[in-house]
Amino acid sequence: MKVRLILIPLLLLGAILIPLLLTGEASTEKVEQAINAFPSIYPDYNGVTIPPNIAPLNFIIQEEGEAYRAVVKTGQSDVIKLENRDGCMQFPMRAWKQLLADNRGGEYTIEIAVKKEGTWHTFKPITNQIANEDIDSFLVYRLLNSAYTRWSEMGIYQRDVESFDERPIINNHATEGKCMNCHSFNKNDPQTMMLHLRGGSSSGTLILLNDEVRKVNTATDFNRAGAYPAWHPSSKMIAFSVNKLEMFFHGTAQEPRDVLDRGSDIILYFIENNLVTTSPLVASVDRMETFPAWSPDGTWLYFCSCPDFASFIDGDDFRYEDILYDLYRIPYNLQTREWGELELVLAGADVGKSITMPRISPGGTYLMCCLANDGHFPIYKPSSELYLLNLETRDLRKLNINSDQADTYHSWSSNGRWFVFSSKRLDGLMARPFFAYFEADGTSHKPFILPQKDPRFYQSFLKTYNRPELVAGPVTVRPQVFVKTAYDNSRRFDATLDPKVAVRDQPVGGEKMYNIAPN
């Protein structure tokens, strides 16, 4: 009598896998046949490098068959064995965590077999690497509908990447369905955070610092309210771009939607004394400046810039394809509050692309950015790809993680060995978060999507992941605190303008527009 110990799925309480002892006569199955090809699995977790603290990489075997088997091995030892009839492979959390802990810096293989007409067909084994370095334990992102007409349903969420736990930081069900965007953290610290609320009496910028949430209005007689943020490493100040953005539609394009920036400058907002300042070097009347980013030591402010919007209009002719943003930087002394000389780092015309969204690695050696054919808003551009600039050698190269769809917003892990980015590669419509391992020499490994408990999740989830940010732990402030602060205009901080800054006839972007109505 032959005895086999296998794991089969029990379709109860989320398909919990339990071991059953099967007994019977000698097996009548045919000899296994080897297939010299990799199996088709979804998501694509084949040949990836993963963190030693990531949640289980569950997947579906996308091969025709009547039964499915996946055996995880380290060396010659079987570590996890799953067998079922639907090909949905969900690894037990405890066994998965033990696998990663025991093989940090090593690798594991997955041997997949599919049963057809009584014969098991065994595919080439999948091999994945386990890095030595952890990834930051939480990912923060905005979830919203991909259709721009349905933007009113959104929220900012945090996901524990070591498990499948997802919780809201704030949802706009509690803020009258108004927009909330541009969440940002200082050096991956979940307790040093900011986000914008737009529209209605809750409008303002919420800043979490030193266990206190405050609501501020960064609009002054010089500027509209701040938009794209960049924390100074000291946590004393935040650089903002001030933009006048509007939807734009191409007559013929793979993706007709677009966003125009009709006017932008950069300001600095000092938190302690509630002061806004700037300089003509970063707030020029002849150019548009946007997407600020600080170097890790806080001495350089990087940003993107192009000529004023009007320079691209010739009568009825709008030369949109000529809008190419350049990459600049400028030194800034926080103690003396003095600006240095403006420096062109990389010209869009020299690379034939528009340069946006710079983010500097924690070590200060590399700058990652988006390069697209034109314009300001890469998430709507299938041409958008991620590039890496070595700030020491000024060598620029395209990363090997790009696809034929929009690959955009990216953020670094606190140790600089991982980054996350948004990609529409699955369907061309919705952005999903992908992780990639980053070597010290600047090379990156094959990216993999944020794992979900049900590997079929992305096939039916119809919201897009926006602005993924890696953080070192959870945001512990309750959503109710953010909402209460948003509606308490009696304790709002209205920014004052540095008297050294000359007020223009009109604020940046044309008509004056505060993001908070007076009481």
Image: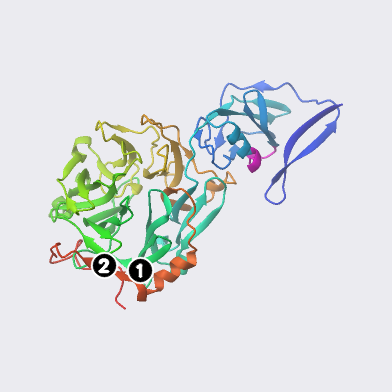
The mark found on residue 203 in the picture is 1
> Position of 79 compared to 44: left or right?
right
> Position of 46 compared to 265: left or right?
right
Q: Amino acid at mark 2?
A: Ala
Which sits in the foreground, 404 or 412?
412
Q: Residue at x 47, y 59 (%)?
A: 169
Quadrant of the image containing the N terminus: top right
Q: Residue at x 13, y 51 (%)?
A: 311
Whether residue 35 can be seen here: yes
Task: Answer above or below: position of 253 versus 219.
Answer: above
Q: Earlier in the sequence, mark 2 or mark 1?
A: 1
> Disc 2 marks which residue?
495
> Position of 334 compared to 75: left or right?
left
The magenta segment is 84-95
Which sits in the foreground, 469 or 299?
299
Task: Answer above or below: position of 404 versus 156.
Answer: above
Q: What is the spatial separation of the Cα atoms under label 2 and label 1, in whole angstroms?
A: 14 Å
Q: Residue at x 12, y 67 (%)?
A: 505
Q: Regarding mark 1 in the picture, which secondary structure is present there?
A: loop
Bin the neighbour count of mark 2 within 10 Å (Cα to Cα): few under 14, some 14-19, many 20 and up.
some
Q: Quadrant of residue 283?
A: bottom left
